[in-house]
Amino acid sequence: MPDRIGKAMAKDQSVLPLRQRGGERIDRLVGEHAEKLSERLQAHRAQLFPPNARKELRRFTSGEAAQLLGVKDAYLRKLHLEGRGPSPEIRAGGRRYYAPEDIQALRELLEQGAKTPGTYLPGRRDGDHLQVITVINFKGGSGKTTTAAHLAQHGALQGYRVLAIDLDPQASLSALHGFQPEFDLLDGGTLYDAITYDDPKPLAEIIQRTYFTNLDIVPGNLDLQEFEHETPMALSRGEGGLFFTRVGAVLGQVEQDYDLVIIDCPPSLGFLTMSALSAATAVLVTVHPQMLDVMSMCQFLLMTSNLLGVVSDAGGDMSYDWMRYLVTRYEPGDGPQNEMVAFMRSMFGEHVLNHPMLKSTAISDAGITKQTLYEIEKSQFTRSTYERAIESLNSVNGEIEGLIQKAWGR
């Protein structure tokens, strides 16, 4: 992309400086800062994870495993003593710990004896359509990536087959799952490779496994921005066709492999976001309950309505199973925030999720080590801080899971 821009500017001799400027060249200064920061981040990752190592998810206590499965801890102990299901790791004091794959194996075992189908494996059944949830907001800092990451991981832990797609060139969702774009994706490997107009690759070749059982990812990097530049040129040549169908078309290639697709969209309303919205069956809008954020969301909604109206007129499918607003970084003791939440509920009614995502130092502290609250050891925090944060996340994600199940008619 930089080469193409440089060549275009070289042809246009009218691009001349209006005046001579002193000081350092900004392009070189920014480049030096980027290189230093990239090296420091790589060193940070090497310190957290040795060379050639991949992130691994911790083991879960028997109590945590029982809670995820919806059974009593005593019942898991009984299964273990009877030699049924996977054998947990036994630590000091006889405490049992289960790996993520053990929990999935237990789900499959328990499902065999369940009276109601889907009790332990809640994913798609015959006739159910793939749920594609786009997480969007025009304004950065609304908790979009945090929401997408925890929603995807919650789904995986609950037994759904989940594909997470990082559509944001900033690639924060990828970083949370152990991918540093400028080191791990030197030869591509983003969704751009599958939706490009020139020799696209099958999506299955791009999908990466994560350290979460049931969770795969399509990572992101700056290559995604190419789609924003290529699409108008392809349209001007009459080659773009229905550009907004490209994401949905490639998801169709792997549709039978997943129950849920969670797309973390960029904080802009470009061709990538419009294509993701066209592929979606549900939309989740994150919003921080502050006046400036709500004003920004108003502009975002107006622009979204206008652009998607054009897409609909061109043949795009704009029907959704559900759309909800999620209040993020919420502080219950903040009076102005409470007023803003009440204002949103009075305006949008049931379209605002009942449960907000609380602002928590536990979530931000976990992010320092590129982890989410579902993967970090709760012993790293005070008990009340952790339980308050995890209860908030589980309430939000449980409410969204209810919407997913309702969309499947149950």
Image: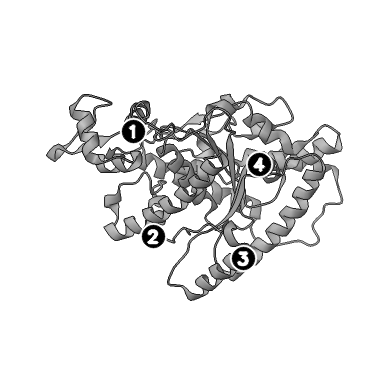
Give coordinates of residue 131: x percent, y percent: 57, 38
> Is label 3 or label 1 in front?
1
Determine which residue is flagged by label 2.
361
Residue plotted at (44% across, 60% down): 358
**Residue 350 visible in the displayed image:** yes
Q: In this view, does 101 lie to the left or right of 34?
A: left
Q: How far apart are marks 3 and 1 (CA)?
A: 41 Å
Residue plotted at (72% across, 44% down): 318
Q: Quadrant of residue 185?
A: top right
Q: Which of marks 3 and 2 is nearer the N terminus?
A: 3
Determine which residue is flagged by label 3.
294
**Label 3, residues with CA under 10 Å away: few <14, some 14-19, many ≥20:** some
Q: How far apart are marks 4 and 3 (CA)?
A: 23 Å
Front in this rendered view, residue 167 or 274? 274
**What amino acid is labelled 1 in the image?**
Ile
Confirm or deny contact between disc 3 and disc 2 (CB under 8 A). Answer: no
> Is label 3 or label 2 in front?
3
Q: Is residue 175 left or right of residue 373?
A: right
Query: What colouring does the structure picture have?
Result: one colour
> Is label 1 or label 2 in front?
1
Q: In this view, does 347 lie above or below 398?
A: below
Determine which residue is flagged by label 1.
103
Q: Which of marks 1 and 2 is nearer the N terminus?
A: 1
- Position of the N terminus by quadrant: top right
Give coordinates of residue 86: x percent, y percent: 27, 26
Determine which residue is flagged by label 4.
276
Helix, strand or loop at mark 2: helix
Q: How far apart are marks 1 and 2 (CA)?
A: 28 Å
Q: Earlier in the sequence, mark 2 or mark 4?
A: 4
**What amino acid is labelled 4 in the image?**
Ala
